[in-house]
Image (cartoon, rainbow, N blue to C red):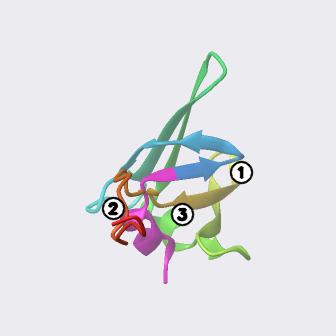
Amino acid sequence: MSLLDDLRGADMLLIGGLHAWQFELREQAEGEQPQLVIECMDGRTRRVWSFAAAAVAAAVAAGEAGSWRLRGAEGEHELVCLGAISADNDDQSDEPDEAD
């Protein structure tokens, strides 16, 4: 599996410990064009990271599933891809009540 595969299934990212749900993955990026652009708020500061296709392709898996190390213009970053968690909002059980 590659970082690109993980990004395709991600709903949110962690970058440098910050939660970033606003990110754009450009499938057709070439050369130095940004393929991955991540945006989040750090307090009142807007932070933006962009990574070229070569950086995304060169990312190295880092221990945990979905955790990657990639190098950008500002240096090396740890990136974690997270999927959405969904739960059933139905309060009724499929099991019949014993009182019935």
Q: How far apart are the alpha carbons under marks 1 and 2? A: 21 Å
The kind of residue on which mark 3 rests is Ala
- Side of 16 where 59 appears, left or right: left
- Residue 86 in the image: x percent, y percent? 41, 57
User: Does the CB distance between marks 1 and 2 fall below 8 Å?
Assistant: no
Q: Which residue is mark 3?
A: 55
The kind of residue on which mark 2 rests is Glu
Residue under the image location 58 percent in, 70 percent down: 66
Closer to us: 86 or 84: 86
User: Does label 2 or label 3 sit earlier along the sequence?
Assistant: 2
Q: Which class describes the residues within 10 Å of circle 2: few (<14), some (14-19), or many (20+)?
A: few
- Residue 51 in the image: x percent, y percent? 50, 53
Per the image, is 6 magenta?
yes
User: Does label 1 or label 2 sit earlier along the sequence?
Assistant: 2
Q: Which residue is mark 1?
A: 75
Quadrant including the C terminus: bottom left
The kind of residue on which mark 1 rests is Gly
Element under label 3? helix
- Tag of residue 30: 2
User: Does the CB distance between marks 2 and 3 fall below 8 Å?
Assistant: no
Q: Quadrant of residue 29?
A: bottom left
- Tag of residue 5: none
User: Does label 3 or label 1 sit earlier along the sequence?
Assistant: 3
Element under label 1? strand
Q: Compared with residue 27, is residue 95 higher up or lower down, i.e. above or below?
A: below
Residue under the image location 44 percent in, 56 percent down: 84
Closer to us: 10 or 46: 10
| Residue lying farthest to the bottom in this orientation | 1
Q: How many marks?
A: 3
Per the image, is 15 magenta?
no
Instruction: Tell me which segment is drawn in magenta.
Output: 1-12
| Residue lying farthest to the front in this orientation | 99
